[in-house]
Amino acid sequence: MKPAERTFVALDTRDLNRARELARVLAGRVGGFKIGLEAFVAFGPSLIEEMRGLGHVVFLDLKFHDIPNTVSHAVSAAAKMGVDMVNVHASGGRAMMEAAVEAAKSGTKRGAKPPMVIGVTVLTSMDAAAMKEVLNRDDEYLPLHHVRHLALLAKESGMDGVVCSALEIDINRKACGKDFALIVPGIRPAGSDVNDQKRIMTPADAARKGADFIVVGRPVTGAENPAAAAKAIVDEMKKA
């Protein structure tokens, strides 16, 4: 898969015209678009329908985390919309993830390909200190061990891959194998603002370590020339 096809751009905006413009100028330059909570709450399924109607690959990033029955119905609804990827929090447990995997298959229209179902390990906005506070543990290696545990649980539950930071690519690849997809947000080109991200890495380093997909938001969507910013990221991945 080419670097451009492995790159998702986050359409995190409440400005519908801006979302449409980004989708237009980035078409063919990136692999697809991630629609998260902000855009989905603002525009609902119509934005997904519009992106799919334009032929774009859609990663629905709503991070479902609820009882298995509720998550099952939510994933089934997402599959019916034709999204290509959907995620749930791996911390929701085995039963919830197994229900999500089954719902993705049963909710997909006959003849269509079910969406990839991805587990979210730990948000890239959290650092070691934040994780220690949440989990009430004091362990120097807590982030790596906790992410690895959730990744393995996701694989055992039948998930297609996980969302993790680039810092955990090596440990997750070793634990889960080469056929388990690693989707990596928190990507920041050298010299760019880190914003609220903590566990970050450059596109080149993430590609070199073996990320299957990267997710980039503000470094592209906040750039004066989003198309040029996306091209620079893809070119950096090619060199890696």
Image: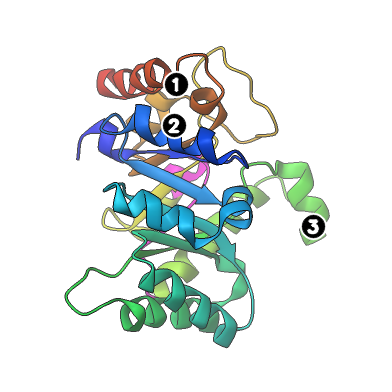
Mark 2 nearby-residue class (10 Å; few <14, some 14–19, many ≥20): some
The x, y position of residue 98, in whole percent, is 45, 81
Q: Secondary structure at mark 3?
A: helix
Along the horizontal axis of the image, is 131 left or right of 112? Answer: right
The x, y position of residue 63, in whole percent, is 57, 61
Mark 3 nearby-residue class (10 Å; few <14, some 14–19, many ≥20): few
The residue that disc 1 covers is: 226
The residue range painted magenta reads 157-171
Location of residue 22 with respect to 57 vertically, above or below: above
Location of residue 95 with respect to 118 vertically, above or below: below
Determine the residue positioned at 27% across, 32% down.
3
Q: Nearer the viewer, residue 164 or 116?
A: 116
Q: Closer to the camera: disc 3 or disc 2?
A: 2
Numbered disc total: 3
Distance from Cα at disc 1 to Cα at disc 3: 36 Å
Q: Is residue 195 magenta?
A: no
Check the image and name the residue furthest to the front: 17
Q: Earlier in the sequence, mark 1 or mark 2?
A: 2
Query: What amino acid type should be assigned to the residue bearing mark 1?
Result: Pro
The residue that disc 2 covers is: 22
Determine the residue positioned at 33% across, 19% down.
231
Q: Closer to the camera: disc 1 or disc 3?
A: 1
Determine the residue positioned at 41% across, 74% down.
156
Along the horizontal axis of the image, is 192 left or right of 22? Answer: right
The x, y position of residue 200, in whole percent, is 57, 32
The x, y position of residue 183, in whole percent, is 42, 48
The residue that disc 3 covers is: 134
